[in-house]
Amino acid sequence: MLRVFADFAARQLERQRERHRHQPAVERRIRDVLDRRRFHVVFQPLHDLDGQRIAGCEALTRFTSEPE
């Protein structure tokens, strides 16, 4: 049982280390998208089918950087 727990803990620590290692690159990509405004917002109406009217809208963000 201790071996199973040790293996599990080792895998979790390895995943955490990998996430930590990639964190600066992720932050740079996010900063680039925000600084260069590589996104735009579109609004999509929400229809009330029973009442046959527009009940509201949702704001959706579309990104122009890769991956989209």
Image (cartoon, helix red, strand yellow):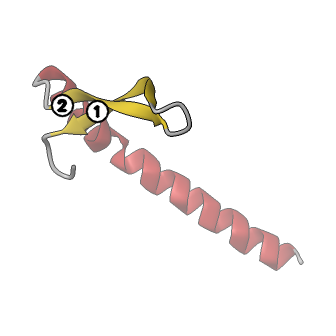
Residue beneath disc 1: 61
Say what secondary structure mark 1 lies in. strand
Q: Nearer the viewer, residue 56 or 4?
A: 56
Around disc 1, counting alpha carbons within 10 Å, would you say few (fewer than 14), some (14 to 19), or many (20 or more)?
Answer: few
Label 2 – label 1 distance at C-alpha = 7 Å
Q: Residue furthest left?
A: 36
Q: Residue furthest right?
A: 1
Q: Residue at x 10, y 25 (%)?
A: 36
Q: Nearer the viewer, residue 49 or 59?
A: 49
Q: Position of residue 64 (x, y in %)?
A: 13, 40
Q: Position of residue 35 (x, y in %)?
A: 15, 21
Q: Position of residue 1 (x, y in %)?
A: 89, 78
Which dot marks residue 28?
none
17 to the left or right of 22: right
Q: Nearer the viewer, residue 57 or 20?
A: 57
Say what secondary structure mark 2 lies in. strand
Q: Residue at x 86, y 73 (%)?
A: 2
Q: Image quadrant of residue 56? A: top left
Q: Image quadrant of residue 28? A: top left
68 to the left or right of 36: right
| Label located before the other in sequence (2 or 1) | 2
Residue beneath disc 2: 39
Q: How many marks?
A: 2
Contact check, label 2 and label 1, Cβ < 8 Å: yes
Q: Residue at x 38, y 49 (%)?
A: 21
- What amino acid type should be assigned to the residue bearing mark 1? Thr
6 relative to 40, above or below: below
